[in-house]
Amino acid sequence: MKRTLAILVGNPLSALGVILVAAVVLAAIFADLIAPFPEHRGAVVDFANFNQPPSWQNIFGTDLVGRDLFSRVIFAYRISLILGVVVLVIAVPVGVTVGLVAGYLGGWTETVLMRVTDVFLSIPPLVLAMSMMGLLEPTLTNGMLAVTVMWWPWYTRLVYNITRSEKEEGYVLAAEVIGASKLHVIFREILPNCVPAVITKMTLDLGFVILIASSLSFLGLGVQPPTPDLGSMVADGAKYLPDSWWLTVFPGLAILVAVFGFNLLGDALREILGVEQ
């Protein structure tokens, strides 16, 4: 704890990352309490206040049907974080397990698993997600599926490299000598040494998942209206630049804050956990 506090105090950017991520997470969790107009997350119209610039009543302005933009950004954070967490909850166990098995067993198992992983890694992530979403109905569930399919190989490659080096260490050889099973060696001996690197990457990836999901929504392949989504709000507002600048600027800044915060937090965790770059 003392070392963690020393790192955060000594590195202002790390402390800033913690603050930004805490603000985003708390805003998403307590959106119903924070948002001044919680009903504006849905199919609500208020043509008397449509397309209004920022004011004391609507600090981010209003959109083209009169909904409070600040309220919709807050609820969009909730959607983005749910998507990011679900994607990583599915992708991380799959990628880590494949990497552990391939790295420890070697032989034809390693060849088959890692060549499949390389095939997925050879395709640009956004292109793969767009291809899947082009075949599926653009819903939140399908968006999670598309992002998950392209995310697990990164954890496979990370854990595979760690496993290749760890399996030659003395503690692994000692476990094998006393008759420990392969499952015991993989999940009880090697896996704990992969956890710091995996946790650091998960923190960094939350920001990138939000960015990819927003990119899909920007292209009309993600979350569909009237559900608030940062990418779709940027896309809708871009048509009315520069006059109605707030329609694009504030959702874009919201994406920037989330991605920047998770990247800074990931760098802080890398230093705290002693993960090599």
Image (cartoon, grey):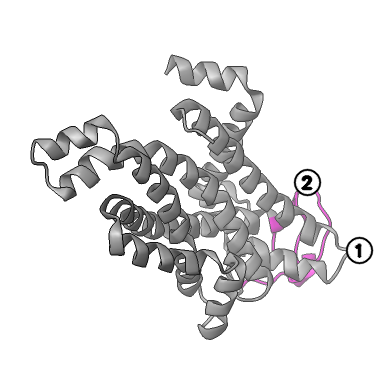
Q: Is residue 103 left or right of residue 152?
A: left
Residue, x 56% and y 22% (percent of image)?
8
Along the line of sight, the residue nearer the viewer: 259 or 250: 259
Residue, x 81% and y 50% (percent of image)?
55
Residue, x 17% and y 32% (percent of image)?
174
Q: Which residue is mark 1?
A: 243
Q: Is residue 219 above or below residue 34?
A: below
Look at the image and tell me whether residue 66 can be seen.
Answer: no
Along the line of sight, the residue nearer the viewer: 262 or 197: 197
* Screen quadrant of the N terminus: top left
Q: Which amino acid type is marked by label 1? A: Asp
Q: Is residue 261 left or right of residue 194?
A: right
If you read the primary sequence from the N terminus, does the residue marked by circle 1 or circle 2 appear first? Answer: 2
Q: Which amino acid type is marked by label 2? A: Trp
Q: Which residue is mark 2?
A: 56
Point out residue 20 in the picture as x, y percentages from the top left corner: 61, 38
Along the line of sight, the residue nearer the viewer: 262 or 185: 185
Q: Main secondary structure of the magenta part?
A: loop
Residue, x 66% and y 52% (percent of image)?
255
Span shown in magenta: 43-69
